[in-house]
Image: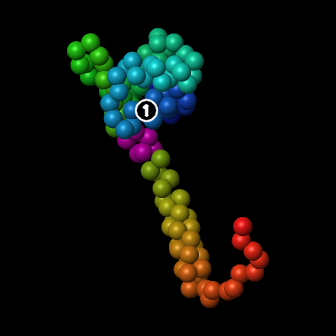
């Protein structure tokens, strides 16, 4: 499955968001995803399998539990593809940052004027 097909599913994106801070047991993922999306344990397990097989998540056994975490390999593939377009938006974002800084500087250096009206 192509990386963007994997990420197109809101359940899988949410699972990755849950795993981003660190490992979670499969039961914890099932509890959250089941409550948020109203899907079964089997359906969550299928999503975890897709994430594992596509390189977005890894699993390690710990006694009876299975601990899932984000696998950087899948995200690196997405980053590499998106990277082709960085030259398009980075100059625009840099220009935006410059304009924001200029506006803040102008407000900071503007003379203070007396406000009219009453404060609540």
Question: What's the image's color scheme?
Answer: rainbow
Q: Quadrant of residue 25?
A: top left
Could you say where residue 21 lies in the image, as x and y percent from the top left?
37, 38
Total labels: the figure holds 1
Q: Residue at x 37, y 41 (%)?
A: 76
Q: Residue furthest left?
A: 63
Instruction: For residue 2, say whether it is visible.
Output: no
Q: Residue at x 42, y 45 (%)?
A: 79
Secondary structure mostly seen in the magenta stretch: helix
Residue 111 lies in the magenta stretch: no
Residue under pointer 1:
18
Image side of residue 44 versus residue 53, left or right:
right
Q: Which residues are magenta?
A: 75-81
Could you say where residue 86 lies in the image, as x and y percent from the top left?
48, 56
Q: Which secondary structure lies at badge 1? A: helix
Is residue 74 placed above or below 44 in the rendered structure?
below
Q: Residue at x 39, y 32 (%)?
A: 19
Q: Residue at x 37, y 20 (%)?
A: 26
Q: Residue furthest right?
A: 117
* Nearer to the camera, 21 or 4: 21
Image side of residue 78 versus residue 8, left or right:
left
Instruction: For residue 111, say whether it is visible.
Output: yes
Could you say where residue 56 lies in the image, as x and y percent from the top left?
39, 31
Could you say where residue 34 lies in the image, as x and y percent from the top left?
51, 19
């Amino acid at each position: 499955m192509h990386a963007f097909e994997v990420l197109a599913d809101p359940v899988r994106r949410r699972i990755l968001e849950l795993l981003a801070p660190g490992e979670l047991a499969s039961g914890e993922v099932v509890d959250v995803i089941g409550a948020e999306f109203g899907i079964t344990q089997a359906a969550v397990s299928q999503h975890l399998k897709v994430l594992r097989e596509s390189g977005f998540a890894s699993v390690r056994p710990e006694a009876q539990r299975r601990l899932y975490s984000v696998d950087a390999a899948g995200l690196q593939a997405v980053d590499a593809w998106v990277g082709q377009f960085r030259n398009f938006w980075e100059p625009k974002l840099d220009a935006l940052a410059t304009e924001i800084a200029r506006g803040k500087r102008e407000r900071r250096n503007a003379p203070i004027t007396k406000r009219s009206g009453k404060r609540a």
